Image: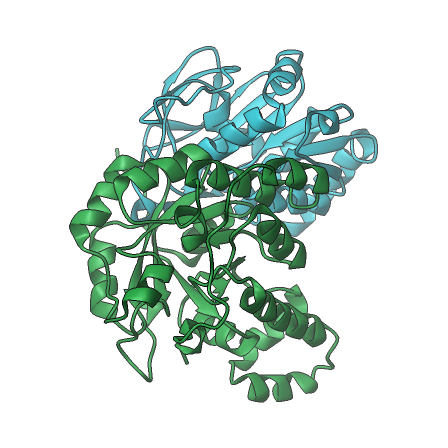
Chain colours: A green, B cyan
């Protein structure tokens, strides 16, 4: 007996993002790190060849990871595995889909492949997450089929300031749009360079139609608490864990801080005795956030 | 459809709504959608992240999310023991997807250290239908909530491999997807994403 099933619907694609809310998605470069992340309570891992701070340091062209390395991570953990493709590089995305990764991140951290177009994400069964620095960018990505938005921040710096700027920009504009008169929404759509129907939708919803997470610069439990209190629904932590002194306890602490983000007593407790956070970079030469259009 | 829902809502509200508060475990995952579903039925909810927040609830919802993450947070928050005690003492419980994995007697294809609460007599296989590309929607027949098909949303869903002393309320492809043991209900799919509150409504009716 086989009953009817429909795969790849917007509901199941956005649904997985909804399941990740309140969780921490951790960048990992091999199976060992993936196990540490899962042990710490990560709700998903992002498989990539080098964490953003190393991409920043090494320079060169950053591409999709070797499928063998992603395979190894898929075999090592039971939680969802995400992987990155370059902006506009739909062939890399096709490979990631054929590998059965659970989410594809069309990421500005890798070197962009197309200076005009992002991937047509509607064409895929595998859901996509994309970065955004402002509401217009977020809505353009959603119109292309992104099922999750992450504020970009500035990956690999360990500096939270860009993440805060992007979150405040996106959420502030959403708050303003919910107060706008119907005829003002045409002006918002023009100003944001975003589809009118999405602007009208968020005027009603008061939030993006897909989950919004935060990435880029989170290095401490208090950072996670900060962005959650600002309105992020989950956090991505890249270099912040595996470039710190002692990754495992820091990973666990950030997981607990993300759950109990409003409870300063718990944040204090989990922040105590973690050793040094990643050193960080206050004036980065390369600005990943400027990639994407 | 809409009319029928209104009639049932009045019935529910007369008996239950306004008198009870549903606790929604909110350590990680899609707890918000459960809050919205109960709010649409006119029922109060409260988020549960710490043991003391469990004290005054009349029912508990264990939402979807990542079961390994939720399980670790159950331990670090100190919720595990009080939650098991409350469920064993008869607290009405609605568990979906990852939440149902937490309730199971044993978990297949899980982490070696996965230690479910073992309050529902089923064995369950994590990601039993495959990875995200295999996530699917399928209409479900659930006699207890009426003739109209219920939209089943299965996301990296677990598969029930053995049912002991539970009642099977719905199946897909011959496999149980909705089960109950008295006041404890478990679904491998996500009624909270279905935009159809009939399962929440039916669950409420036994929470008096």
Q: Quadrant of residue A179?
A: bottom right
Q: Is A258 or A219 nearer to us in this picture?
A: A219
The answer to whether B112 appears left or right of A221 in the picture is left
Relative to A123, residue A233 above or below = above
Could one spot residue B87 in this view of the protein? Answer: yes
Q: Is A146 or A258 nearer to us in this picture?
A: A258
Q: Is B24 or A219 nearer to us in this picture?
A: A219
Q: Quadrant of residue A3?
A: top left
Which residue appears at 29% of the width and 55% of the height? A48
Q: Quadrant of the N terminus of chain A?
A: top left
Q: Quadrant of the C terminus of chain A?
A: bottom left
Q: Position of residue B174 (x, y in %)?
A: 33, 28
Relative to A10, residue A286 above or below = below
Relative to A151, residue A233 above or below = above
Could one spot residue B4 in this view of the protein? Answer: no
How many numbered tags mark residues here? 0
Which residue appears at 75% of the width and 39% of the height? B43
Which residue appears at 60% of the width and 46% of the height? B33
Q: Position of residue A15 (x, y in %)?
A: 47, 50
Relative to B29, residue B110 above or below = above
Q: Position of residue B36 (x, y in %)?
A: 66, 47
Q: Position of residue B72 (x, y in %)?
A: 50, 29
Q: Is A172 or A208 nearer to us in this picture?
A: A172
Which residue appears at 51% of the width and 38% of the height? B64
């Amino acid at each position: 007996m086989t009953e009817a099933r429909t795969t790849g619907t917007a509901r199941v694609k956005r649904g997985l993002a909804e399941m990740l809310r309140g969780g921490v998605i951790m960048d990992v470069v091999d199976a060992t790190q993936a196990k540490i992340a899962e042990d710490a309570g990560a709700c998903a891992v992002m498989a990539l060849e080098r964490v953003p701070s190393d991409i920043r340091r090494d320079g060169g062209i950053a591409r999709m990871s070797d499928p063998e390395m992603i395979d190894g991570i898929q075999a090592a953990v039971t939680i969802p595995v995400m992987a990155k493709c370059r902006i506009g590089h739909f062939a890399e995305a096709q490979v990631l889909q054929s590998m059965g990764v659970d989410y594809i991140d069309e990421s500005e951290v890798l070197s962009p492949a197309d200076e005009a177009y992002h991937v047509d994400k509607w064409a895929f069964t595998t859901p996509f997450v994309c970065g955004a620095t402002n509401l217009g960018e977020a809505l353009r990505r959603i119109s292309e089929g992104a099922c999750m938005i992450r504020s970009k921040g500035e990956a690999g710096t360990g500096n939270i300031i860009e993440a805060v700027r992007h979150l405040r920009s996106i959420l502030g504009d959403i708050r303003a749009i919910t107060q706008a008169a119907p005829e003002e929404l045409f002006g918002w759509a023009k100003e944001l360079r975003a589809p009118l129907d999405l602007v009208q939708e968020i005027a009603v919803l008061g939030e993006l139609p897909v989950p919004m997470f935060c990435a880029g610069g989170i290095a401490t439990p208090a950072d996670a608490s900060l962005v959650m209190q600002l309105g992020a629904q989950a956090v991505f932590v890249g270099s912040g864990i595996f470039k710190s002194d002692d990754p495992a306890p820091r990973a666990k602490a950030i997981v607990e801080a993300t759950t109990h983000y409003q409870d300063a007593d718990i944040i204090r407790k989990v922040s105590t005795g973690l050793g040094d956070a990643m050193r960080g970079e206050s004036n980065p030469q390369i600005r990943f956030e400027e990639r994407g259009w | 459809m809409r009319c029928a829902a209104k009639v049932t809502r009045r019935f529910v509200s007369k008996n239950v709504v306004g008198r009870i508060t549903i606790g929604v475990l909110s350590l990680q995952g899609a707890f918000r959608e459960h809050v919205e579903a109960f709010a649409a039925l006119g029922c109060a909810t409260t988020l549960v992240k710490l043991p003391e927040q469990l004290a005054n609830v009349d029912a508990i919802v264990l939402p979807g999310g990542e079961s390994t993450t939720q399980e670790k947070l159950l331990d670090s928050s100190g919720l595990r023991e009080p939650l098991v005690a409350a469920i064993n003492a008869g607290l009405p419980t609605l568990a979906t997807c990852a939440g149902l994995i937490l309730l199971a007697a044993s978990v297949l294809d899980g982490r070696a250290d996965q230690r479910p609460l073992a309050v529902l007599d089923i064995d369950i296989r994590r990601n039993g239908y495959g990875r995200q590309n295999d996530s699917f929607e399928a209409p479900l027949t659930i006699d207890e909530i009426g003739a109209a098909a219920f939209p089943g949303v299965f996301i990296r869903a677990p598969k029930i491999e053995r049912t002991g002393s539970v009642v099977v309320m719905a199946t897909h492809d011959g496999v149980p997807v909705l089960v109950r043991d008295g006041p404890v209900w478990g679904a491998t799919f996500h009624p909270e994403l279905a935009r159809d509150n009939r399962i929440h409504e039916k669950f409420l009716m036994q929470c008096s």
